[in-house]
Amino acid sequence: MIRFKEGNLRIPKLQRAVYIVSGGMTDFRKRYPERATEELVIEAAKMAFEENNLNVSAEELRGMVNFCIYSQFADHFGDQLLAEARVHDALGFDPLGNFGVKTGGATGGSSVLAGVMAIASGYASCVPVVGWERMDEVGTREGNAYIASAACKNFESELGWSYSSYYALMAQRYLYENDLPREVLAKIAVKNRGYAQYSPFSQAPMDICEADVLKSKFVSDPLTFLDCCLMSVGSACLILADEETAFKICDHPIKITIAAGSHTLRTADRRNMDIPLLPNETAEMYKDYKWDYPGFSSFLAARMAAYYAYNAAGIVDPVEDFDILETHDAFTISDIQTYEDIGLRPYGRGREFIESGDAFLEGKLPTNLSGGLLGSMHAVGATGIFQMIEVFWQLQGKWAQFHEDEKMWKRFGKEKPEKFRNLQVKNANRGCAVSHAGTGSHVTVSILENVN
């Protein structure tokens, strides 16, 4: 059994506040043969430097940058070791210091954490965090095998070199433990793919119903094609700054607090333990909980990341305290697991969050209005950054600026839907984004909030 010492539960404390000042991205596609990786990265950075209503010109902003963080999941896809050096050169930031980050599916979130640490420590004052993935230079089967290598190759790989197989086993266990109907998972796919219809950045927007999800082809029982996330190509760029620099750059920077958790790469090595309690939970809530924790159906890494981040940012009840949320919905089952891990509902009751309507635009905590990984993208190195940009624009009240303008749709060769829906959350003040890796080996939880 895991038992914590006092130092293990120390709450992270930044030496100075860190802010997001700008964000930009490409659209996301299954294939992007007409664009080199450098072109995609430059396009995302160009949006961040030029299209966020900043108080400084792009050239002035470039002159403020003093460190860079790069986010790419796998060298295999582009067949280029140290690809971050190529990107750094293409963006024209040579000879500034930089490094790349890799933590599986959580690479984007971990890269932002690295940027926050650089600024909070005083090492840097303005840091672009740039992520991308080039997943179209290999076949789908080969690409899935590369991705599956982020799980333990001595254990999970025997299940078929596919994350859908890994998560299918967790889904079967979760459905058994919680007597969960498949229709509940289908609701998540319908919601997230539906919201993707209103984003010019999205790869797979769909107007579907629960029956469509249930009838689509099985990838790995009980997960169907529509229960699974996308393989994508694209890039995203987030710019971080300290307080003094942030308010020079823009009038409306967004403060960020971020924390990380981890768990064993090999799921069979996960030991039983008492459930770590979040600020909105008590031991009494789990007195009748009969399953081993975390078992095969919960993510301790997400629980720990939420524990550190909530306590650092003063979050008491996530459903009440957040106005917008982005989860790492790689699979519909991982989404409902995350609802519980971050305390939206107690363990065993995650279905209540989606069934209550709280997860929808009209609900208490709209979730994955971006379309998420199911509907919009999973260009892995860019994913966690994409999530934070979507929350950032919501908190700035700029969602429509980047999603509603017909010129943005035309830029990517797309047609804006006739029945377009504005997904801007009214009076959004605080948001959260969860970046998740593997079968729960690494997770970051980021809390973004207005300070004006």
Image: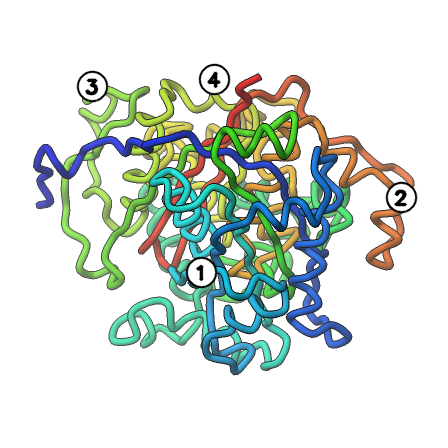
Q: Secondary structure at mark 3?
A: helix
Q: What amino acid does circle 2 point to?
A: Glu
Ranked by sequence position, the earlier of labels 4 and 2 is: 4
Q: Residue at x 19, y 22 (%)?
A: 283
Instruction: Name the spot of residue 166 as percent of width and height, x first.
Output: 38, 63
Where is 118 relative to 269, above or below?
above
Ranked by sequence position, the earlier of labels 1 and 2 is: 1
Q: Residue at x 10, y 32 (%)?
A: 6
Question: Which residue carries the number 3 mark?
Answer: 284
**Labels 1 and 4 touching (C-beta < 8 A):** no
Instruction: Name the spot of residue 331 as percent of width and height, x first.
Output: 50, 53
Q: What amino acid does circle 4 point to?
A: Glu
Instruction: Name the spot of residue 38 as percent of width and height, x first.
Output: 65, 70
Alpha carbon distance from label 4 to label 3:
21 Å
Question: Which residue carries the number 1 mark?
Answer: 97
Question: Which residue carries the number 4 mark?
Answer: 320
Question: Which residue carries the number 2 mark?
Answer: 406
Alpha carbon distance from label 2 to label 3:
52 Å
Ranked by sequence position, the earlier of labels 3 and 1 is: 1
Q: Is residue 37 left or right of residue 289?
A: right
Q: Is residue 59 left or right of residue 138?
A: right
Where is 48 relative to 381, above or below?
above
